[in-house]
Image (tube, rainbow, N blue to C red):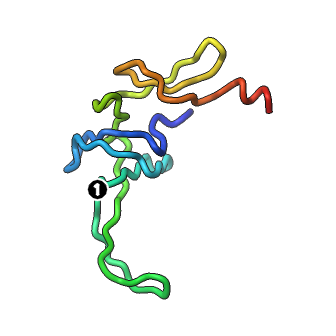
Amino acid sequence: MASKIKKGDKVVVLAGKHRGQEAEVVAVMPKDDRVLVKGVNIVAKHQRQSATSRGGIVREEAPIHISNVALSAGGKPSRVGFRKLENGNVERFAKKTGEAIDLVRDRESKRKA
């Protein structure tokens, strides 16, 4: 099954202290059901000094659960659906607006390869 939220998607945070904020997905961790969103859930991490990096307090994004984000369709949260096209391709689309997001499976490129 294809992922409903992918790296590079614009998402809206649904829960937590960053609720309502719109940002881009940096990484997806499907085994943990978590996503890393740019500028959201910033935590302070105490890092020990090593040969390559200085020690100190480092601020970085922490992953949040995938259920706490939704795809942004026109600035509003939307669910993601999959639909099969006439030519056999499968695409992701925003259920709120009905607009296509991207192709998940392209049958034409598989036949040429």
Q: Quickly name the residue at label 1.
A: 41
Q: Is residue 64 above or below residue 72?
A: below
Q: Is residue 17 above or below residue 53?
A: above
Q: In this view, does 43 lie to the left or right of 91?
A: left
Query: Which residue, as the protein is rendered here, is positioned at the far left?
Result: 17
Is residue 34 among the parts visible in the rendering? Answer: no
The kind of secondary structure element at disc 1 is loop
Quadrant in the picture for the N terminus: top right
Residue drawn at (34%, 33%) of the image: 72
Query: Which residue, as the protein is rendered here, is positioned at the far top?
Result: 86
Q: Is residue 113 left or right of residue 13?
A: right
For the residue marked with disc 1, what is the amino acid? Answer: Asn
Residue drawn at (37%, 55%) of the image: 63
Tell me where residue 80 appears, x and y as whole percent. Answer: 42, 28
Quadrant in the picture for the C terminus: top right
Tell me where residue 61 appears, x and y as whole percent. Answer: 34, 60
Tell me where residue 98 appears, x and y as whole percent. Answer: 41, 18
Which is nearer the eye, 111 or 46?
111
Q: Is residue 70 above or below residue 17?
A: above
